[in-house]
Image: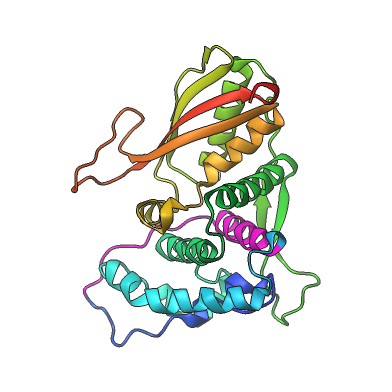
């Protein structure tokens, strides 16, 4: 299966080595597997991993890696069955994986599979709702700071397995975001960040309503259409105690805190910014989020 190693940089690239080879060729496969940018995939998975380590979710990261590997192993047959009509052969192409040094994470379905496994393993160690909230905000804060400063994303390992002189796989771009306490500025900054996420391939599109002031609060609604980890998000929001990455919301929370606001939100799987459904046949197209912001001194 695409590999799991214990070192920080190697932990995600190794995930592919854990995948069992397919028992036989799947000749009926006709659909191409959607891809996502390697820089985006690595940034999201690494930031989650690094947050686990810095938070001390597991006292020994080897224990986390072991549980993560078991989660991938136990869930792989279900993963492969779900996408049996898609071409997953690149996940078993060792030469191509070594050449790209992607670890398979650019395969959108496999990325979601890894992301789902991360948050299920984290959930077993962080059980209290308030602790889960704080951990999620830590992940969002790290991503937000990375957006503000920009980063050169390095390959997990070089050909000799050395940490020094690792080749770059791309640039996590820097963004100068508008900051302020006025609802107009907050709205502008929110749209800047969501457009940034859209431009780097995180989602297909987004919508944001007007920011409305109500007393000491500011309210608005956002909708993120087809985030790259939508499959994981749907699965985790419907199980796992609802404990899911929510990367875009957590980035926005960090931004609002940077502007002097505390923020709370309620989100739901939805078809658009206006439509939600509880039908058993409902197919989510994204996540709709209702926000409330308050100045820190009034929270």
At x 47%, y 53%, the residue is 243
Q: Which residues are magenta?
A: 28-53
**At which x and y percent is residue 233?**
41, 52
State yes or no: residue 139 in magenta. no
Above or below, comparing residue 138 to residue 86 in the picture: above
Residue under the image location 25 percent in, 38 percent down: 277
- Percent x, y of residue 62: 64, 78
Q: Nearer the viewer, residue 154 or 292?
A: 292
Which quadrant: the C terminus? Answer: top right
Query: With 39 as the anchor, is 77 left or right in this view?
Result: left
Q: Which residue sits furthest bottom?
A: 23
User: Is residue 44 or residue 92 the one in the foreground?
Assistant: 44
Instruction: Please state the total of marks drawn on the protein image.
Output: 0
Residue 231: image x %, image y %?
37, 55
Reply above or below: 56 against 286. Answer: below
Give whichever of 203, 296 is nearer the camera.
296
Q: Main secondary structure of the magenta part?
A: helix
Q: Is residue 106 left or right of residue 255?
A: left
* Residue 296 in sight in this render: yes
What residue is at 34 percent from the left and 84 percent from the top?
Answer: 22
Measured as percent of width and height from the top left, residue 195 is found at 54, 34
Query: Is 32 within the magenta?
Result: yes
Visible residue check, residue 96? no
């Amino acid at each position: 299966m695409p590999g799991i190693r214990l070192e920080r940089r190697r932990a995600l690239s190794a995930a592919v080595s854990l995948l069992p080879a397919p028992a036989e060729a799947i000749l009926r496969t006709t659909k191409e597997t959607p891809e996502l940018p390697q820089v985006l995939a690595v940034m999201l998975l690494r930031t989650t991993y690094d947050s686990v380590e810095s938070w001390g979710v597991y006292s020994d990261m080897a224990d986390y890696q072991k549980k993560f590997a078991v989660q991938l192993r136990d869930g792989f047959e279900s993963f492969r069955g779900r996408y049996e009509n898609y071409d997953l052969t690149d996940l078993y192409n060792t030469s191509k994986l070594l050449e790209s040094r992607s670890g398979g994470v650019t395969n959108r379905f496999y990325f979601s599979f890894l992301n789902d496994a991360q948050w299920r393993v984290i959930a077993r160690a962080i059980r209290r709702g308030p602790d889960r909230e704080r951990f999620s905000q830590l992940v969002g804060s790290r991503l937000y700071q990375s957006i503000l400063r920009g980063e050169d994303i390095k390959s997990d390992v070089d050909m000799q397995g050395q940490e020094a002189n690792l080749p770059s796989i791309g640039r996590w771009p820097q963004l100068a975001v508008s900051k302020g306490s006025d609802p107009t500025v907050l709205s502008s900054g929110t749209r800047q960040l969501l457009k940034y996420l859209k431009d780097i391939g995180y989602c297909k599109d987004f919508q944001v309503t007007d920011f409305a002031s109500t007393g000491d609060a500011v309210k608005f609604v956002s909708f993120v259409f087809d985030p790259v980890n939508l499959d994981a998000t749907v699965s985790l929001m419907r199980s796992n105690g609802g404990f899911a990455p929510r990367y875009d919301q957590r980035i926005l929370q960090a931004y609002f805190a940077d502007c002097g606001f505390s923020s709370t939100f309620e989100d739901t799987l939805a078809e658009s910014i206006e439509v939600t459904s509880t039908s058993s046949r409902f197919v989510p197209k994204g996540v709709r989020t209702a926000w409330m912001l308050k100045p820190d001194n009034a929270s």
